Image (cartoon, helix red, strand yellow):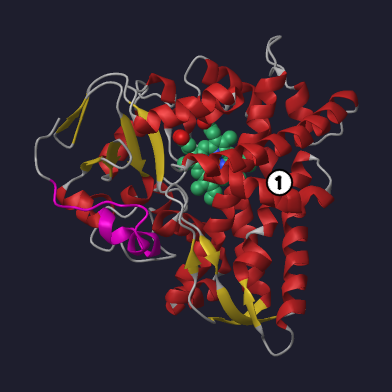
Amino acid sequence: MSAAVHPVAFNPLDPAFVASPYETYAALRDDDPVHWSKLLCGWVVTRYDDVAAILADPSMSSDIRRATPNPIVRIELDGLAKHDRAGRTIVHLDDPDHARVRKLMAPPFRVREVDRLRGLVDARVAAALDRLAAATGATGSEVDLVAEFAYPLPVEIFSRWLGVPDEAAPRFRYWTSWVARSRDPMPAAEREEFFAALDAMYRYLEDQAELKRREPAGDLLSYLVHAEDGGDALGHEELMAQLITLYMAGHEPTASLVANGVLALLHEPGELAQLRADPGLVPNAVCEMLRFDGPNQFVRRVTTEPVTLSGTEVPAGDILYVGLASANRDPRRWGADAGRFDVDRTDADDHVQFAGGAHACLGAHLARLQAERFLTGLLARVDGLELAGDPTWSTRMFIRGLQSLPVRCTVRP
Ligand code: HEM
């Protein structure tokens, strides 16, 4: 372990960090790239090379049960003891269980399959823009782009793909807002509310899965209920854990990607103008949005062997907070203009916002498709887009997202 006295303060709950974590990341990368956080009882890793090495290292575990007990680990283990299904999520499995579950789930998430959802996504974007047109009127009243556009859409789209009725979307929005917080350290009282939301969501999805078991309907849920690989299938509890994970992993980050991305465009009118002039740049702009201010700040890993990162020795059994968002701004990787938002950046696609290695985001194609179609729809129909007030950020540590993005605009029919 490094014995140096570290001068950089890292407090993910500090309002200044919430407003913009990037200054802290820069200081950590320069002066304390493998930072011991007393608050998180683990190491905060911020340089691109270290992050990439951890993501590619098969000795790294995603299972908190392999960590040496400390206060954070104990809180989580208590939670898992009471609600064991949370431990079955693909996100927290190691091989061979991880590889097995991933193989059963993966086929519908491949790029060719996901591309088939383009019509559904476009129809939902068009309907959302119609609603936005009604809200802003001909004169361009103020609206909250998060509440009216970025947040509801991914839930609606995923629920439709999964095959649950549209009417359930508002409930899923409530449930997922809780579930998405589960990766942050949480006080005990909040954890109870979180588990209550999880139970309600679980019961609803269980009924839906039972329906598809009896009557397959050609949707994602029917696929997963009946998925088979050489006689192997997802057990009931296993399936339920993955369904909740899909909601947890999918909505908040997709909504945040769109909202954070639009904010970046509002701060850089030149980039917005370039995108309007050449909508062919949209896929690259989405990669740049993922790199520049992507939602996933960290993934967590547990070391199972001692490892040396930027000269710091980390023993086996320790927790690593792997700084994806910091890596994406590291000038050692991206050059001196790493902190500039550039829709034309040629290597933007090398970002690590979807992590990498065995646990690389399963929903990456869906997330990109949605963001590209959302953005294309906005560019085609929204005029005079401008900030109408200060945006507010949620205080989550793992997912950086806007709680509100007040804008003024007019929407063409
Ligand atoms: C902008 C949007 C998204 C971002 C930035 C994102 C990011 C990530 C990251 C960083 C991981 C790795 C977690 C870890 O290693 O601990 C991950 C895993 C995962 N993501 Fe996403 N995600 C997004 C959208 C989605 C969507 C739309 C879905 C599906 C509906 C999805 C499903 C998953 C699943 C199932 C995993 C677990 C994969 C595994 O452990 O093998 N994600 N995502």
Q: Farthest left residue?
A: 4
> Can you identify the residue that label 1 sits on?
158
Q: Position of residue 129 (x, y in %)?
A: 72, 70
Q: Position of residue 342 (x, y in %)?
A: 39, 66
Residue at 42% in and 58% down: 293
| In the displayed structure image, the side of residue 329 where residue 103 appears, left or right | right
Between 206 and 164, the residue placed more toward the observer is 206
Q: Residue at x 52, y 68 (%)?
A: 262
| Viewer-closest of 172 and 413 | 172
Classify mark 1: residues with Cα within 10 Å, few (<14), some (14-19) or many (20+): many
Q: Which quarter of the rendering shows the N terminus?
A: top left
* Residue 34 figure quarter: top left
Residue drawn at (76%, 29%) of the image: 223
Q: Could you say whether the residue bearing mark 1 is in a helix, strand or loop?
A: helix
- So how many labels did they put on this image? 1
The amino acid type of the residue labelled 1 equals Phe
- Per the rendered image, the range of residues in magenta is 6-25
Label 1 within 8 A of ligand 1 by Cβ: yes
Q: Nearer the viewer, residue 378 or 326?
A: 326
Q: Is residue 62 visible?
A: yes
Which residue is most to the top?
A: 231
Q: Residue furthest front?
A: 189
Q: Residue furthest right?
A: 215
Q: Is residue 10 magenta?
A: yes
Image: 218 above or below 77: below
